[in-house]
Image: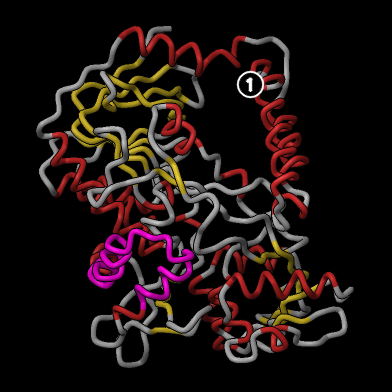
Amino acid sequence: MSDKVFKDIDVLVIGGGIAGAMAAIKAKDAGAKRVVQVDKSFVGKSGASCFDAGVSHVYFPQQDDLDDRVRRLVRSLGSLAQQDLVRVHMEQSYENLLEHESLGVTYIKDEKGKIERQAGRGSYPVVKFHGPDLMDSLRKAVLKKRVDVVNRAMITDLILDDGKCAGAVGFDARTGEFLVFEARSTVLATGSTFYKGRSPGHRDLSGDGFAMAYRAGAALSGAEATDAPTNVMPALFDIGPGMNMYMGLGARLVNRKGERFIEKYAPTLKERSGLMTINAAFCLEVKQGNAPLKIDMTHFGDMEMAKLKGALPLAMTMYERAGLVMNNRFVTPIDWMVIAPFARPGVVIDNNYQSTVPGLFACGETASPQAVVMGIAAASVSGANAGRSAVTYARSSETKAPTQEIDKLRERALSPLQRKGGVEPDQVILAVQEVVLPYDVILLRHKKRLEKALEAITEIRETQLPLLCAYT
């Protein structure tokens, strides 16, 4: 089977979520003749964005203190942040919101027709929108801009030409056909990843963008410091996320005694505290023998339920199917737990969102958390800016895809398909989980335990990965 080659691409966008969509849209707006957006599933219907929790952190110029908001975000990153990019995200977030609304995103408004702001976790309120509207609207905008969309394309590696990014390669997820994308500039918008513990959606976050950037020589940073070290989600059901909505509407966290325990640890914000505080409270309650811990929303009335159904229609449908919601009411408190940390790495970028590899840009949660914080607004703003910067670079870029390089990448990508037997992917994932997920490695960190875990991971890489086989 011969390769399928896509040539003469000004901007190649890898990723089908909000950051990728905005990068593609703005690249077209900036004058790029050919923009190609690829996704391993379906642009607009994969990754975290389409399952978003229906809330966004937006700076309102007439109501908020910009310096205070930037200071709080920087502090959440342990003060290790690219403060100029954090400020850009805040400054542009409101204009970004209005653009989304013009594209068809339905924001929840009050009786006067103004966008409603609701309490969430933390000191600043959030805006709410109908979850599925976001990516449905942006997908339509991508197609209207005549972006070439390629679905079911699993991108595996970046092409290098004399140290510059010259596109990417991958394969058709259904046919196995090898794909080559020759591009003057490339934007990575492949989303985040986190430790593969028990949590909703962990299989959707494969970390492929980080891996291909690393292999291409791009600098990565931030795995040790992020604004959301972990999260709390349902313990027995694969439903999530939604914490900002639940806590903003008045959900209560209770222990096995029925006590609202969070008040002991955060008497001011209580359940609206930041995730770091909530995580610590969960751990301390478990250590004191007060598990299981639950979230109680049985007191929610018609107003709260209507807001949840508007912002989180998928999650609410799943609650109903699980028997946790009946007759428009939560019927029982739900077991809740701490999940594995969100300590994502990220591609180091400059103020133009370009990585240390010329021609390679990163946005959304593919970029370093010190540069682009988590959340819908940050992903969207950074995607738009990365798309514009990629066009500027492409205008002066002349690259080619070396045949020898492509041959090497093809062999690497397709070799698991050629093996008749070997190590299955789930076995490797389980082996990694057994090494990194014990609490005294992933949470209570110590040099000796971390060094021992690193040795085990290295052994997995050297003994199991060479035998990896693909399901067919």
Q: Which residues are magenta?
A: 69-98
The quarter of the picture where the N terminus appears is top left
Q: Residue at x 44, y 17 (%)?
A: 177
Residue 266 at x, y percent in the picture? 64, 85
Asked whether residue 89 is drawn in magenta, I would say yes
Mark 1 is surrounded, within 10 Å at the Cα level, by few (under 14), some (14 to 19) or many (20 or more) other residues, namely some
- The amino acid on which the numbered mark 1 sits, given as a three-letter code, is Ala
Q: How many marks?
A: 1
Residue 365 at x, y percent in the picture? 43, 51
Asked whether residue 465 is drawn in magenta, I would say no
Q: Quadrant of residue 405?
A: top left
Which residue is at the front of the view, 63 or 344? 344
The prevailing secondary structure element of the residues shown in magenta is helix
Q: Secondary structure at mark 1?
A: loop
Which residue is at the front of the view, 309 or 461? 461
**Mark 1 — residue?**
470
